[in-house]
Amino acid sequence: MQASCPTLSFFHSPKFLQISLHIISAVGIPIYIFGGYCILCKTPNQMNLVKLVIFNLHFWSTLMDLFMGLFVAPFILLPSMSGFPMGLLGYLDVNIPFQIYVMLTVIVLTGVAILHIFENRYNTIIFEFSSRKVRRALFFIFNYLLAFTFVIPTILRIPNQSEAIKIVKEQFPCEVDENRFFVLALDVRVTHYSVIITSSLIEGQIIYFVIRLLMNLSGKDDRKSERTRNLQKRLFRAICIQVTIPVLLMFIPFLFVIIQVSLEYHNQAQTNISLCLLSLHGLISTIVMLIVHKPYRDATLNILAASKLFQKNTNNNSEPTRNSVPFLIVTT
């Protein structure tokens, strides 16, 4: 830091971001484990067709949170595409471009997992798994290939670090530490185009499947019983809620990031808080899943009730009885 640099609040510091991200991960890990347990062990037979895709979403959402908050924990200096990792992989001296590649790929794979759920419902409800193996194979190949390759153009254009850090330091003389900063890109256009194209392709497919499912479930289907249709509708509503609430909650911090980059506006405290909120996606998704799906909600309530009963019995056993109260006999 230079002597002329202004004194900033704790919310602007890397330490605030690091502590916050690690706390979120520590709180989330037992909830992630319990959510996975409910999916694998408490999913009823009538939900077997969707069990694996729900677990797939849970797995990638959890991994995204862990990369954001524990493994990478990135400190990002916006609007420049620079920063440094503060997570476990950084302490292990894992190559920074590799950390960036894996973290961004996991984020996109979470989006693909959301898409996979709606494709599964679309295929089950509308086509009933009728001879679409080739189309589905092409669907999966395309989307997973997209997830694993979308960040490669940015990685291939990483600039010379000594020159790039000098340029970024001229823009942010008080924030940049040459010893640990890494510049991903000086020209952000390639990254912007990659993000826009990838998100548009995934979101467009999700919207298509949701519209087709809404049209089908709002009408009649003589091939299925009323009970089956009601189960399909309830499950579809629960999945929509499970996916929509975390996405809506993440929209505001994601919008802040886009505004900062687009308008070249810098507010490190806002960036840090936005990253903390973005790292909550998997945690919120898991909590919503445990609430909206009845089998998981019942399992959670049963465990909470058992825990409360155990605590009550423990407290009762620890209370001294009248006969056990110690007394003193005084003799003369």
Image (cartoon, helix red, strand yellow):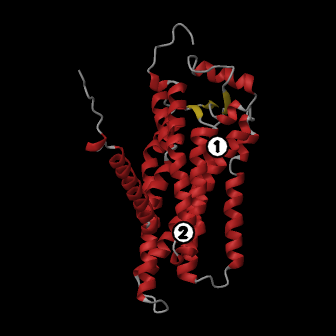
Residue 181 in the image: x percent, y percent? 66, 25
**Label 1, label 2: how many angstroms apart (C-alpha)?**
28 Å
Q: Identify the secondary structure beneath mark 2.
A: helix
Residue 286 in the image: x percent, y percent? 49, 55
> Residue at (63%, 55%) from the top-left corner?
109
Q: Say which quadrant the C terminus sits in.
A: top left
Q: Nearer the viewer, residue 52 or 244?
A: 52
Residue 118, which numbered label?
Answer: 2
In the image, residue 162 sits, relative to residue 48, either above or below, namely above
Residue 102 in the image: x percent, y percent? 69, 45
Whether the residues at callouts 1 and 2 have beta carbons within 8 Å, the answer is no
Q: Identify the secondary structure beneath mark 1.
A: helix
- Residue 290 location, quadrant: bottom left
> Hey, what amino acid is under mark 2?
Phe
Q: Say which quadrant the N terminus sits in.
A: top right
Q: Is residue 189 left or right of residue 298?
A: right
> Hey, what amino acid is under mark 1?
Thr
In the image, residue 100 sits, relative to residue 107, either above or below, namely above
